[in-house]
Image (cartoon, coloured by chain):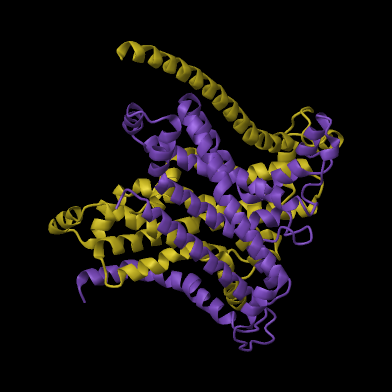
Chain colours: A purple, B yellow
Amino acid sequence: MKPTTRWALLFMGPPIALFAAIVVLPTAMALRLSFTDANLLGQSSEWIGLENFTEAFTNEHVRKSIRITLVWTLFGAIIPPALGLTVAMVLQANSRFAAIMKSALFVPISISLVVVGQVWIWIYQPGDGLINQLLGAFGLESLQEAWLANRSTALYAVFVAWAWQQTVLAMILYLAGLTSIPSELVEAARVDGAGQLQVFRRVIVPLLRPITTVVLSLIAINSLRNFDLVYAMTQGGPVRETETMPMLIWRILFRQHEQGLASAVSLILFAMTLVVIGGLTWWGRRGSYVE
Amino acid sequence: MSSNAAPAASTRRAAEGRGRAVRRRAGMALIALFVAAYLVPVAGVVSTSLKTNAEIARRGIWALSGELTFANYVDVWRTANTVRYLVNSFHVAIPAVVVSIAGGTLIGYALAKFRPRGGTLIQLVIVSGLFVPPQVLLVPLFTLFRDLDLLNTLWPMILIHSAVGFSICTLVMRNFFDQIPDSLRYAALIDGASEGDVFWRVMLPLARPALAALATLQFTFIWNDFLYPLVFTSARDDVATIMLGLLNVKGQFTVAYGTQASLAVIASIPTVVVFFVFQKHFVRGLLSGALKE
């Protein structure tokens, strides 16, 4: 054995063993469980082939949660990055504020989703919630709503609370990206007669592409893993209107005790994550100036 | 030609100046709106935590009035399991942050500098851990920890966060050590240092900024985690971490907003402080983790 191989084993062996035990093996076990009718009470564990997957794709609750998660990911990839980039550009132009704001905005992104959920419950509350109080103050009582209890507003309400935090994440990363663009590049484009919009489209956006890839990847992963906020705010209700895939998997596992079906749905979520991240990586590489 | 161009240019410049003023004002308005959108909710929690529950019941959460008092904090500190929750959270976060970063650094260094056969595959497997939804692991791990009799202890969280953290830590550290020239290592080896010495005395001190970035990321992530404590320790309040404790307390005192708010503030202080101190590292950590061209 080459001495460097021996050193490599010594360095990597213990952490890799832990990783195998906690991540790799359980993933393989989940794959096996997804082909069985195992349940948490341990009564049976028969091999039932693809039945869990056919059940997953025909069950209306699973289908609905897939739809919610996909739509959430799509809007999550559009709204927070767009808002974040806009604010980052304004802030960069008014650099006096940028420094103070940058420090202050670490508060919303460092707090947990459980706390974010708590704050937004108070904002949405029917009686003395902030939104309804403001509507009342402007004489718009007719628009007051039990935002989280109403089936048609609950999902949007939870999404807004989530987007509130993700926008800052996008903004902070974009601000770092904008500062790294050499101002000579922008000035050169101006001298060549490019207007504001052209500079944005042809210089800034392409140069920010690597940052955009990071922002979108982080937001996509956060969308697809969205459990904490939903649990804290609605637990999937009212009438399962806000049941994202992670929330549904939790319910199948700990309310219905169906390990097999829960594994199958979680693997569908894993596959969705890989497709989304694969697509983003491809997109990021394709337009990158750095080879 | 030139007599024509000059006035055209000057009117264009004037229009540009007006445009800039308008944009500036629109920008200011946007910043003000943005500040309000973040200041109001945060200030709301802090002010609620400083009002008595009776006052909140009378005037509502968002009323801009009432005496400020630290009574809720004193109360929460004494009655609920707050201190226990905080101790539990540190008990999970500190070992898991240390182990995940240590392991990720060792793997990243070995991959970058020893270049073992199969290294690419090893890195692929470890980094794909970033994309495995926690729910995939929950199903088998729940039965595993139940069989090992580790439910309602802090071990599941320590073990899971340590191992899951290897993914991001390996990615960041591999990229970091790739940038450090091999000549540095060879020079030290020729001077008679062992590979272990090179790693410990030469490479690790250089890696300090990357390690600080990872510490910020990992601490925040682990401290704020709520899913694993909910799944593995929900049966016993005295092993709850602070995030689970927040929900337990909410269940106990449904309308005691002041109590909930003060606990939420206490729960947020550690991560806010860490962010304040390490904010630059955080951004660099996130960007270096994914910008690996």
Residue B156 shows in this picture: no
User: In the picture, residue B170 is in which quadrant?
Assistant: bottom left
- Image coordinates of residue B243 in percent, x first then y, are 64, 53
Q: On the rendered structure, is B95 left or right of B144?
A: left
Q: Residue at 27% x, 69% y: name it.
A: B116
Query: Where the N terminus of chain A falls, by quadrant?
Result: bottom left
Residue B271 image-quadrant placement: top right
* Residue occupying the point 79% across, 61% down: A239
Query: How many numbered marks have been drawn onto this rendered protein structure?
Result: 0
Q: Residue furthest bottom?
A: A46
- Left or right: A29, with A140 as reference point: left
Please say whether residue A80 is visible from this viewpoint.
Answer: yes
Q: Judge left or right: residue B3 versus residue A166.
A: left
Q: Is residue A278 left or right of residue B231?
A: left
Q: Closer to the camera, B161 or B194? A: B161
Between B180 and A202, the one lying in front of the other is A202
The relative height of residue A243 versus residue B291 in the rendered view (above or below) is below
- Residue at image position (36%, 32%) is A186
Taking the spot 29% from the left edge, 48% from the top edge, the residue there is B206
Q: Position of residue B58 (x, y in %)?
A: 87, 35
Percent position (x, y) of residue B27?
Answer: 54, 27
Question: Which is more toward the observer, B9 or B61?
Answer: B9
Extreme residue toward the front, this view: B1
In the image shown, does A161 or B282 lie closer to the viewer? A161
Give residue B109's position: percent from left, percent from top.
Answer: 31, 60
Is the residue B14 above or below the residue A62 in the image? above
